[in-house]
Image (cartoon, rainbow, N blue to C red):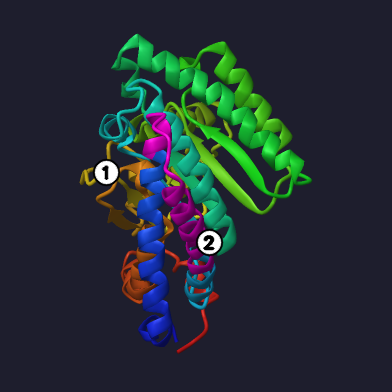
Amino acid sequence: MLGLLLSHPWCSCMVLLLSVASYIGVAGTARTATTEPALPFQQRCRAVCGFCATAATRLLVRIVTQGPVPRHVAFIMDGNRRYARKSQMDRVSGGHYAGFEKLSSVLEWCRELGIANVSVFAFAINNFGRSAEEVGALMRLAEEKLVELADRSVAENNRYLRIRVAGNRELLPAGVVRSAEYAELVTKDATAMTLNVCFPYSATDEISCAIRRVVEDAEDGAIAELAAIGEDTLEQRLRIPGPDLDILVRTSGEIRFSNYMLWQSARMAYIQFVDVFWPEFSFFHMFRVLVSWQMALRSINKRKAQMGLSPSAAAAAAPSS
């Protein structure tokens, strides 16, 4: 079914329109950041392309949702600083603010697609080694935007987005911790989608903390027998809970995990490296990732069965062919 839809000439036209509109939209963002005014003709072009992009996105959403939809997608949001340099934006905060705006767009796409769980690598523990100016700007951005996302969810009768901050909070300033606690508290009853904000995070820190919790629970008697300790015991104590990770996307063209969700990725997550900076990531890139995953899903579930893992929940809901 999906193959027939993708082969339709109207689908090809819409994909092309979305690509052009996305490019012009990114160019418009860069122009705005440099405060260079747009000419009237350029403004009209952007308005037309915006309309085309919206129409194309709606069509591609309908195409993708004809097949299985992943339950859990994670993003390594890489390339904000390089995007800032390329676009002549403020090198400290400009790219990171553009990155947050892209995150807002991606969350809307995931909402339309029915993806219930999204995880994002917002700040690595080793990022504390960057300049004090940049770390301070990122902390202020997190303090501001966590509250903004939470308030947006509350404004929609608390049905939109549940926020969880998954990371080592002992390393965070008090203001950021308060924003994280506020965001989690006011969105705890949201049911449509869960956003795991990994901040500050590393997979090795997550796993080592889970091991310490297993040891503490064993000493306290919460775990009756050491022989009962297995993968599930450790997984239940990770900072990023289930469901299993279906897709991990890294932008910027870098081909590495950067110590992100290593445990979750090992359970046959589908890995995609996209050669654009995070603020340039478009719905067309998202569409290609999802279609590629759908085409690989049968093979993924076969490998999962060989490893003794449960198949993708999304595949169980897919229509039989």
The residue at 45%/66% (across/down) is: 310
Res. 11 mark: none
Res. 51 mark: 2
The secondary structure type at the circle numbered 2 is helix
Q: Quadrant of residue 151?
A: top right
Callout 1 amino acid: Ser
Tag 2 near tag 1, CB within 8 Å: no
The secondary structure type at the circle numbered 1 is loop
Indicate left or right for 290 with 169 as reference.
left
Residue 6 magenta-drawn?
no
Q: Can you see residue 123?
A: no
The residue at 32%/52% (across/down) is: 266
From the viewer's side, name the closer residue of 233 and 281: 281
- Which residue corresponds to mark 1? 252
Mark 2 or 1, closer to the camera: 2
**Which numbered disc flags the more N-terminal residue, 2 or 1?**
2
Residue 49 magenta-drawn?
yes
Q: Which residues are magenta?
A: 30-56
Q: CA distance from mark 2 to mark 1?
A: 27 Å
Q: Position of residue 233 (x, y in %)?
A: 48, 44
From the viewer's side, name the closer residue of 30 and 137: 30
The residue at 40%/55% (across/down) is: 22
